[in-house]
Image: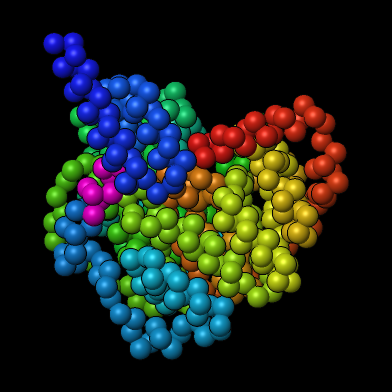
Amino acid sequence: MLILLLAILWLISLLSAGHALLTKRDPRAALGWIVTCLALPGLGALFYWLLGVNRIRTRARELQKQGQGMHWLNVDAEPSNNDLQMFPDSATSQALINLSDAVTRRPLLCGNAVKVLYNGEQAYPAMLEAIRAAEESVFLCSYIFKADRTGKLFVKELSAASERGVDVRVMMDAFGQYYAFSKVHKLLKHTDVKFATFMPPSLARSFYLNMRNHRKLLVIDNRVGFTGGMNICDKHLAMIKNNPRRTIDLHFRFEGPVCDQLRDAFLEDWHFATDEKRKPRSWPMNSTVGNACCRGISAGPNEPHEKLNWILIGALACARSRIRIMTPYFIPTRAQLAAINAAALRGVKVEILLPEKNNLPYMAWATNAYLFELLEHNVHIFYQPPPFVHSKLLLIDDEYALIGSANIDPRSLRLNFEFNVEIFADESIVELIDHFDQSCGKSRQISLDEIDRRSLPLRLRDSFCKLFSPYL
């Protein structure tokens, strides 16, 4: 009997190892799971099927099919003649548009208005004002939504909107909600606001603590949308000097056709989290309100490609004169390092802005271990002074911006559910360039000599953290 049981466990382990060998794209991940399955017969296979198999993608594709033809968003829509006239026609922009057309499932839409919002002092009042003006729907997704002073202001306006008969839905990530002891869903419990938790751990459905919904979306009446890097909490009130965790960040307000794509991204996540069936619903058409050509990009383990990674590497390859990168967490892959260095060697000026003081020290330590590879190829790297800068921004050749929730690290580009927007041909890009250059002027440039002069204990610490960079 024991021999039969062991034979069954070995068979299951061999089949699981074979599955990992055939399906894992990363050879390091494949080797790790094969060793786990074979070293721990039965138990290793159990871990693999619970933690190593991506069942999210299949389920998400089913939900996306449900939405087609139901007046949600025509993902196969061809651009109108008016759009084609507004499309940027430079070689850089055309190359980037072709790349995104190939790897994303949403069209580039022109006629949008973009407003850059700095810190919570500008973003939160604009978001609250939009909620107060809502007539039909308020859709809010936030990775972190704390029940602090700022959070309570949002709860008050969301509750008031639901009392007016507005369809109000709030979604939080299951892991992100534990950043606060006092939970927002308790404040919303006795209101008409619909609340959902994204991917709570469950053996019956999923056990993906490592996959998080990092998106920040607010869509009002399908007319006004907000996205960017800000969560909902007091720490983004950066002008309050005695705020011990104050954080500098950017957020963005959108009007125009791209709001359809923000809404579509929210509703895909909502139906994924709640198992609700999609029902036909007509939405008002958004008219042309500005000059910006924009595209919403949903990225995550539910998508067929590592979209943001492809777009990032493609953008670096398309750059002809200038690359500006601002990110709080910078743990590049070998391909990204090669693309940045290749651009610098081609004569493109590459500038990377990082926070001098990071809220996650181990992330900064891992970053330190990569910097020499860039500095020795004439990439310009700067440290922004405190407070912590959480802004995420990629600017290419003064004509393209990629903004949103994703950082340049393996978690954002492979594991998290992220939402970004690419922007072409708009005055907001000029504003973002000015913001980047001003930030650069206030920052301290670091040199290869400074990195090389780190003491042996610091280099050992940084290199040790680098070993875990795929999981940070």
Residue 367 image position (x, y, % from top left): 66, 42
Q: Residue furthest front?
A: 3
Q: Is residue 292 left or right of residue 45?
A: right
**Observer-nearest of 294 and 137:** 294
Residue 210 position by quadrant: top left
Residue 205 image position (x, y, % from top left): 22, 34
**Observer-nearest of 101 and 241:** 101
At a point 58% along the width and 56% down the height, the residue shown is 336
Q: Residue furthest top?
A: 2
The N terminus sits in image quarter: top left
Residue 354 image position (x, y, % from top left): 68, 48
Q: From this viewpoint, is residue 53 visible?
A: no
Q: How would you classify the magenta stretch by its main secondary structure?
A: helix
Q: Is residue 13 left or right of residue 28?
A: left
Against 218, is 79 above or below?
Answer: below
Asked if the magenta segment contains residue 450, the reply would be no
Against 328, is 324 above or below?
Answer: below
Residue 251 image position (x, y, % from top left): 53, 54
Q: Which residues are magenta?
A: 54-61
At a point 39% along the width and 66% down the height, the residue shown is 103
**Observer-nearest of 284 and 230:** 230
At a point 43% along the width and 69% down the height, the residue shown is 100
**Observer-nearest of 136 and 472:** 472
Which color scheme does this rendered protein use? rainbow
At a point 52% along the width and 40% down the height, the residue shown is 470
Q: From this viewpoint, is residue 57 visible?
A: yes
Against 26, is 378 above or below?
Answer: below
